[in-house]
Image: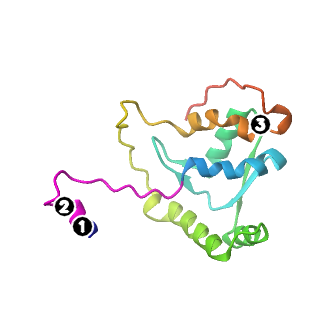
Amino acid sequence: MYRGTCSGGLGPGWTHVRPGMFAGNLLDWSDAIRAEGVVTAPYDAAITGPAKVSQAEQVKAIGVAAGEEIYFEELTPEQAREQWLRDGCPEEFADWRIELLAVSVDGPGSSHRPTPSSDHGRPPRTFAQWALDHASEFRPPARMGEAVCQRVTW
């Protein structure tokens, strides 16, 4: 079915997008960042867009945008699984999440492909821009209302 959709007989060619990780999911890091200033995860997996950005680079960009010192601590897959299970994550989800992160490091999602220009008439946004847009969500409560004006480039 996939091949039939991509080729002949159905009009113009089709593009299939198979996203794996979204920047918006990183809002899950906000509690740990506000409480401890550290993000722990297995692998130094990456998201792609206009540029491929590893988790360590994502944490750095969030820290710059939020005006906070935050760190990335890489866990083994076993350590991450144990932590997620303690946090109430179902086993199946923890296993799937580890597989997803592993694929983003070593699998088909590991190589960066240029992001096509947006169909909206503007270029795709960088992760640093996303981090600036969401900086307040990563600041400790005492600083939540502060604006931090910084230009982040990669």
Q: Which residue is labeled 1 in the image? A: 3
The amino acid marked with disc number 2 is Ser
The amino acid marked with disc number 3 is Glu
The amino acid marked with disc number 1 is Arg
* Residue depicted at 43% across the width and 51% down the height: 112
Task: Tell me how many marks there are.
Answer: 3
Disc number lying in front (3 or 2): 2
Q: Which residue is labeled 2 in the image? A: 7
Residue placed furthest toward the right: 142
* Quadrant hosting residue 127: top right
Residue 88 vertical placement versus 60 (above, below): below
The residues colored magenta run: 4-21
Q: CA distance from mark 3 to mark 2?
A: 49 Å
Our reading of the magenta stretch's main secondary structure is loop
Residue placed furthest toward the left: 9
Indicate the position of residue 54 as horizontal and vertical percent values: 58, 50
Indicate left or right for 151 with 47 as reference: right
Q: Which residue is labeled 3 in the image? A: 68
Q: CA distance from mark 3 to mark 1?
A: 48 Å
Q: Quadrant of the N terminus?
A: bottom left
Q: Is the C-beta separation of discs 2 and 1 under 8 Å? A: yes
